[in-house]
Amino acid sequence: MRRVAGLFLAVVFVLLVPPFAAADLFGLGMPWGSSWGQASSGGGSCCDPGLYGAWGPGKCCTQFFVGWEVRRDRDRRPFASTLDLTGNINGLGFQQINTDFSDPSGLWLGVSNYCQCSDNVGILITGWYLFPTGGDAQENYLTNFGNGIIQSRTWSTNISRGWIDAAFVLGSPCGLNLIAGFRWDSWNFQLKNPSPVTPVSTFAIGTPSDEADLTLNSYIPLIGTQACWGGPCCGLLVRVVGFPWVPGNLRYDVTGIAGPNTRLQVNGNYSTGHFIEVFSEYSRTCPGFGCIGIFARFNYLGVRTRTSPQILGIVPPPVVEDTEGPRGTSWTLGGKVTLNFDTPSLPRLLQ
């Protein structure tokens, strides 16, 4: 997730530098400029919905989001993966390994920049980052040995996630638009401090020093629509994007899977997948400044993965076949601040 954090900071830098640098170098109008205050549709207070002036080519806004991913019922774990194995691993004859992760629940930071390039085309670039947060995971082993004994252990987890979007918004600045773009989404689970395996088996499965790591990289086409009243940055906005096919890859490593000095290594590409996100926000203008508001977001990602697992440290290695089926949901609530500005020098690239 260091790559995600680094790219997130790079997105923040790229989105912030242009308006401030342009203002200094070219004298472009900024939110505190007189033209914005005079063009405001409000009456001079932050209780007026809408936006500064009429939207059109050259109008841009930078938005900052702070939100909290809501933790739900702990029994409804939103992320799970199942690994089906056939073969004789240390005499256990594994059939299945299932891992359920608790809700991530943590602090999200987001930044976006929207610019109107022409009368009917805008560009939206967004970055979000979930700061690492603690959780737990339960790992269950279903074996052939002893008439299908189910053994399990729990882990403490460190969960982080982030994504970067780039999309075209097609249509007039206000009203109903179409959205087409791309998202890179990276999700990482680090597992440590496992509990002893229960029930206690005569065959060793893991040690207290075991560690595991699960990483998913998804490359998601974004197709959808949004409707806004008042403007694309200030007012009421509802956006729905998704895609029925999600390319990506998964990597899972866990030590001690079949005793000390052994390691399970799993790699694979998604075979099927689907994604949907619903995002809504409401904000009001503050003349001479920008907008303040609130937002809510629902995000769902579900994929199946054909992988190529290897168990290292065993000679000869077992025969393995597997299907990974991770899925994840999140609910996020928070607030936003918007800075509006003019870019008169922005070319009408897509007229």
Image (tube, helix red, strand yellow):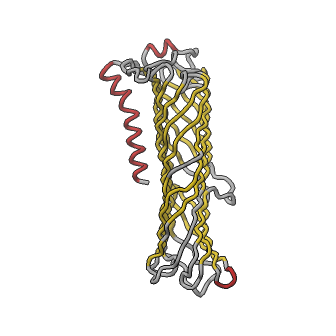
Nearest to the observer: residue 196 or residue 225: 225
- Visible in this render: residue 294? no
Position of 28 compared to 110: left or right? left
Looking at the image, is 122 positioned above or below residue 162? above
Q: Residue furthest bottom?
A: 202
Query: x, y percentage for residue 255?
Result: 48, 73
- Visible in this render: residue 58? yes
Query: x, y percentage for residue 271?
Result: 55, 56
The N terminus sits in image quarter:
bottom left
Question: What is the count of numbered marks?
Answer: 0
Position of 119 compared to 343: left or right? right
Nearest to the observer: residue 46 or residue 40: 40
Looking at the image, is 332 positioned above or below residue 258? above
Please tell me in which quadrant of the rendered image residue 280 appears.
top right
Query: x, y percentage for residue 276?
Result: 61, 44
Please tell me in which quadrant of the rendered image residue 175 appears.
top right
Please tell me in which quadrant of the rendered image residue 197 appears.
bottom right
Image point (62%, 83%), residue name: 200
Query: x, y percentage for residue 78?
Result: 63, 56
The C terminus sits in image quarter:
top left
Q: Residue furthest left?
A: 25
Nearest to the observer: residue 25 or residue 260: 260
Position of 164 compared to 300: left or right? left
